[in-house]
Amino acid sequence: MLLTFYLTFAGVGPRLSEIMSQGIDCWTQLLDGFLAEFGTSDGLRSLIIDGICAGVGSVLSFIPVIGVLFFCLSVMEETGYLDMLSQLADRPLKRLGIPGQITVPLIMGFGCSVPAILAAGEIKNPRSKKLALALIPFMSCSAKLPLYGMMTAVFFPENPGILTCALYAIGISIALIVAAVLKKITTENPAASENYRLWLRTRSHRPMERFRLPSVKKVLSYTWENIKGFFRKAFTVILAASVIIWFLENYGICHGGLAAAANPEESLLAAAGRFAAPVFAPLGFGDWRAAAALITGLSAKEAVVSTLTVLAEGASGIKGLSLPVMLASMFTPLSAFSFLVFCLLYAPCAASVAAMAKTSGSIKHALLTFAFQTALAWLAAFIVYNIGQIFTLLIS
């Protein structure tokens, strides 16, 4: 398993992803030059290059990582290793309401939610699969690390590691609570439960006898089908999200009609941020810039950092404002931690939602998960901020 995670998230996967990204960048530059040569308007060029190509390119850069992951999973499945791992993990985890079957997807969630959700699709037990899909978004994926690093460097420079570990612990703890609650309020299909117990008993003796050489044809076919299925399902969602975010960032309302925004503060994204800001005021960050960053974070979690950076660089009237100075004007240490808790728990990125729709076979399920995650994130951040305020008053 360590080798799988290394190859997927630190070894072959990232290197192939970097090559893919460089290829996409070169192709995008060629396309941009082609559009300029043929006199394409600036607005249309921006939509194609900054909106569609940037959004779809971000999905394509996932493909090598997903390919490596499914190749490794297929090899382990074909050799019989995943069967053994599920059996070994079942006994200690079932006391927490978590079946051993979902061990691998949950661990992978710390790297990236997209391949973790797709890996959960291989779980045969329907209830276990739904539980995995519900818990994976609580695992703090690597895309959130730039945000953690930025906020802890500004507000908690003396203990950035402790605060980051605390965020990981909060995600795991809430996942365990959700698992316990779901265990109480849901009932498993008796036939599926009995089939799983029979499956464990038939593999409880002489585990080494179950190992076998994998079929190269099956491994490659399995990998290709999963890559193709992911891209087919994710393409529409990512394309729509990319166009919407681009439109919000580049246009605003001027003289009663739509027009290109002169700066970020006049864009529709800023207007949406101002509209949503009161919802986050009870959490300690009612600033429209924080709300706008959370909106763009729905496309990709890295976008939270990039949006705040753009707003800091292009803020009208305070040109040259540095990001740390702007963040210090937006947050206190307590509200910054509340903001991090919300970012940790709120709705996963568009690619994860698309992967969830593919894995569950239902867009409705993905949207319900989206709503549940966001509501739970709001509640958790509300509790953190208000308990923190009470504690601050008691010690002051």
Image (cartoon, rainbow, N blue to C red):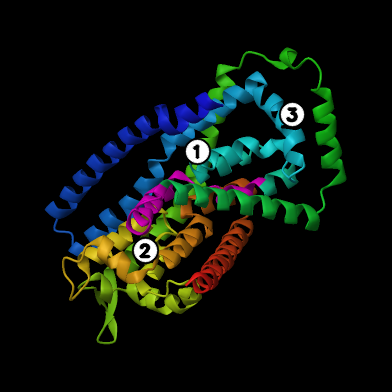
Which of the two labelled residues, at mark 3 and mark 2, occupies the earlier sequence position? 3
In the picture of the structure, the residue carrying the numbered disc 3 is 87
Q: Does the magenta stretch include residue 152?
A: yes
Residue 293 lies left or right of residue 318; in this view the side is: right
Q: Which of 359 and 132 is in front in this view?
A: 132
Instruction: Tell me the element at label 2.
Output: helix
Horizontal and vertical percent position of residue 151: 37, 57
Horizontal and vertical percent position of residue 35: 18, 53
Q: Which of marks 2 and 1 is in front?
A: 2
Residue 13 — which label? Answer: none
In the picture of the structure, the residue carrying the numbered disc 2 is 245
Residue 228 — which label? Answer: 1
Q: Do the residues labelled 1 and 3 touch (CB within 8 Å)?
A: no
Q: Is residue 242 magenta?
A: no
Is 262 above or below relative to 119?
Answer: below
Instruction: Tell me the element at label 1.
Output: helix
Image quarter in which the N terminus is found:
top right
Which of the two labelled residues, at mark 1 and mark 3, occupies the earlier sequence position? 3
Residue 369 lies left or right of residue 299; in this view the side is: right
Q: Distance between the residues labelled 1 and 3?
A: 30 Å
Q: Residues within 10 Å of mark 1 (few under 14, many from 20)?
A: few
Residues shaded magenta: 132-160
Instruction: Tell me the element at label 3.
Output: helix
Which of the two labelled residues, at mark 2 and mark 1, occupies the earlier sequence position? 1
